[in-house]
Image (cartoon, rainbow, N blue to C red):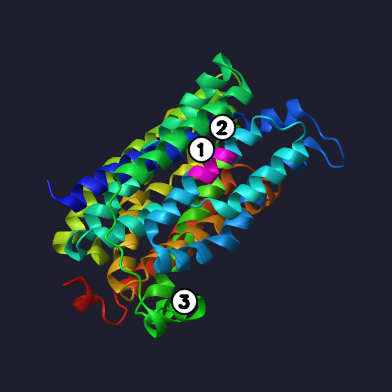
Amino acid sequence: MKKWQRTLYILFAVQLLSVGGFGLVFPFLPLYIRELGVSSVGSIEFWAGMVFSGQAFTMTVASPLWGSLGDRYGRKLMLIRATLIGAIFMALMGFAQSAEQLVLLRTIQGLFTGILAAVNALAASIAPKEHSGYALGLMQMSRWVGIGVGPLLGGFLSGLFGFRETFWITAMLLALAGIAVVFWVDEDFKPAQGKDRPGLLQSYRALFAAPGMQGLYGLTFLRSLGQTLVFPFAAFFMAELLGADDDAAMMTGIMIGAASISGALSSVWLGRLGDRIGHSPILVWGAFITVLFYIPQPFVTSAWQLVLLQACSGAAIGAMLPSVAALMNLRTPPGTQGATFGLENSMNASARIFAPMIGAAISVWFGLRSVFTAGLVVYSIAALLAIAVARSNGSAQNES
């Protein structure tokens, strides 16, 4: 096994521990807010929203800076920072005494974490360019599996041990991930010296000047927006389809798990296929197939129909993720992987700020089914943008 492949598999495990660990707390965060109570002003619902949007906002701001620093001082160092500081803050959240303290800790955590960006930047920098799709597809597979498994385990662990204890379990998983990076991840990093070292603004100017990069960042935002529009309201729609709340949480978990597993399987296979035939056609077909599977979702009449359609659209989205990441890596200027994926993480996080508010407004005004219609509109725009990216100047020579 080659050195870069060994490092890639370690990164797969590190990201799985990290994403799965963070996912442990997602199912019960609003319940933990209610248990802690509010000591100042505002409703429980307000602080339950803030616990998600506050962290997304600070991550949006901080990710590009950490990415640029990774290009200067090493991406391994950024991954160690993200995992170990994340472990500290997750442990502190287990000691929170009020909703305000929890929101403050989550908000500060967003400034210092950003594991997905650090993993992608490191994977992109160590893998040969001709294997970009496979390397980044493998990272997307790890992410999807963590997203699917984490919340399922979190619901079980929180019932078995309690909310606070689950935060401490998450902290231990992140600490293990950080220790694994310190001892087992190899990075042959040679920083640029003196005038050859790019500054923050210089790095991002070079990124946006690269062919198609603005469109790729637009696709990143739209993909995250479409997904985040739907998931917060899926449980309510499930309850409506089932006619009762009893099994809604279970069916929502099955739906998210099915979409995650199908996305995990398709991302690594189609990422490798893109290395052979080009990533642009995979991106375009993935975007249009996502649209096709979203068309019937506002009209479903049973929970299992929605589960099946979400699993199919998850597989199609799984085609988009490694294609976008690989095209970014192929088109980005040399030595700027940290800036590239730092900004990608920022675009993902910024979508998570706006999507819940947009989805809530749409569901109140037009009903829950209209949230899935909004998702269809978002992915339709993404499909058109994917065509523009595929046709952008320089794509043929960059993918050859």
Stretch of the chain drawn in magenta = 84-88
* Nearer the observer, 196 or 356: 196
Label 2 and label 3: CA atoms lie apart by 34 Å
Q: Whole-percent x and y of residue 290? A: 37, 52
**Residue 14, position as x, y percentages in the image:** 36, 41
CA distance separating discs 2 and 1: 6 Å
Q: Amino acid at mark 2?
A: Val
Q: Is residue 145 left or right of residue 104?
A: left
- Marks 2 and 1 in Cβ contact (< 8 Å): yes
Tell which residue pokes out farthest to the bottom in this image: 195
Rate crowding at label 3 as few (under 14), some (14 to 19) or many (20 or more) other CA atoms within 10 Å.
some
Horizontal arrangement in the rendering, residue 384 relative to residue 224 (left or right): left
Kind of residue at badge 1: Phe
Side of 250 where 192 appears, left or right: left
Does residue 59 appear left or right of residue 210 in this picture? right
Q: Give the residue at mark 2.
A: 25
Pointer 3 with pointer 1, Cβ within 8 A = no
Helix, strand or loop: magenta stretch: helix
Q: Is residue 169 above or below residue 200?
A: above
Identify which residue is drawn at 21% across, 47% down: 269
Instruction: Give the amino acid at mark 3.
Output: Tyr
Residue 247's image quarter? top right
Secondary-structure class at tag 3: helix
The foreground one among 102 and 316 is 102
Q: Give the SS element for disc 1.
A: helix
Residue located beneath label 3 in the image: 204
Relative to 10, is 95 above or below?
A: above
Q: Earlier in the sequence, mark 3 or mark 1?
A: 1
The residue singled out by tag 1 in the image is 22
